Image (cartoon, helix red, strand yellow):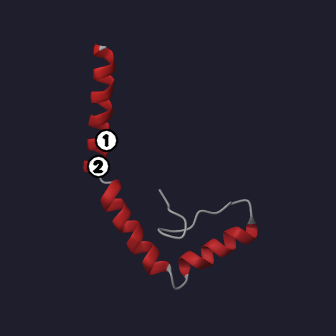
Amino acid sequence: VVLDRVTGRAVDPTNAEELLAGLLDVTGPAAAAYGAAGRQRFLDQFTFAHFRERFVDVVRQVAQQSKS
């Protein structure tokens, strides 16, 4: 869901230095840009309507396979 350095940061949570750098990055000057990019990614890909479209496609594929 998170695109590293686009919609937030993906870090190794067991690496303290990486975790701190990620936290400072997402709460620093880039925070608003990450938030806006994340919101747009949500609207483009993760709304219920998008889920429903993907789900219907999968059901159609399964139905087609069962006909074969």
Q: Residue at x 27, y 29 (%)?
A: 60
* Residue at far bottom of view: 29
Q: Report, in whole angstroms, how far the alpha carbon at label 2 lies from the one at label 1.
A: 6 Å
Residue 50: image tag: 2
Q: Dot 1 surroundings within 10 Å: few (below 14), some, or many (20 or more)?
A: few
Disc 2 + disc 1, Cβ < 8 Å: yes
Residue 43: x and y in percent read 31, 61
In which image quadrant can residue 64 be found?
top left
Kind of residue at disc 1? Arg
Residue 17: x and y in percent read 74, 71
The relative height of residue 16 versus residue 60 in the rendered view (above or below) is below
Residue 61: x and y in percent read 31, 28
The relative height of residue 11 versus residue 57 in the rendered view (above or below) is below
In which image quadrant can residue 62 be found?
top left
- Answer with left or right where residue 53 lies relative to residue 31: left
Q: Residue at x 55, y 65 (%)?
A: 4
Q: Dot 2 surroundings within 10 Å: few (below 14), some, or many (20 or more)?
A: some
Residue 11: image tag: none
Q: Secondary structure at mark 2?
A: helix
Q: Residue at x 49, y 79 (%)?
A: 31
Q: How many marks?
A: 2
In what quadrant of the picture does the C terminus appear?
A: top left
* Residue at far top of view: 68
Q: Residue at x 28, y 22 (%)?
A: 63
Q: Secondary structure at mark 1?
A: helix
Q: Nearer the viewer, residue 34 or 67?
A: 67
* Residue at far front of view: 68
- Answer with left or right where residue 49 lies relative to residue 32: left
Kind of residue at disc 2? His
Label 1, on which residue?
Answer: 54
Q: Nearer the viewer, residue 9 or 20?
A: 9
The relative height of residue 48 versus residue 5 in the rendered view (above or below) is above
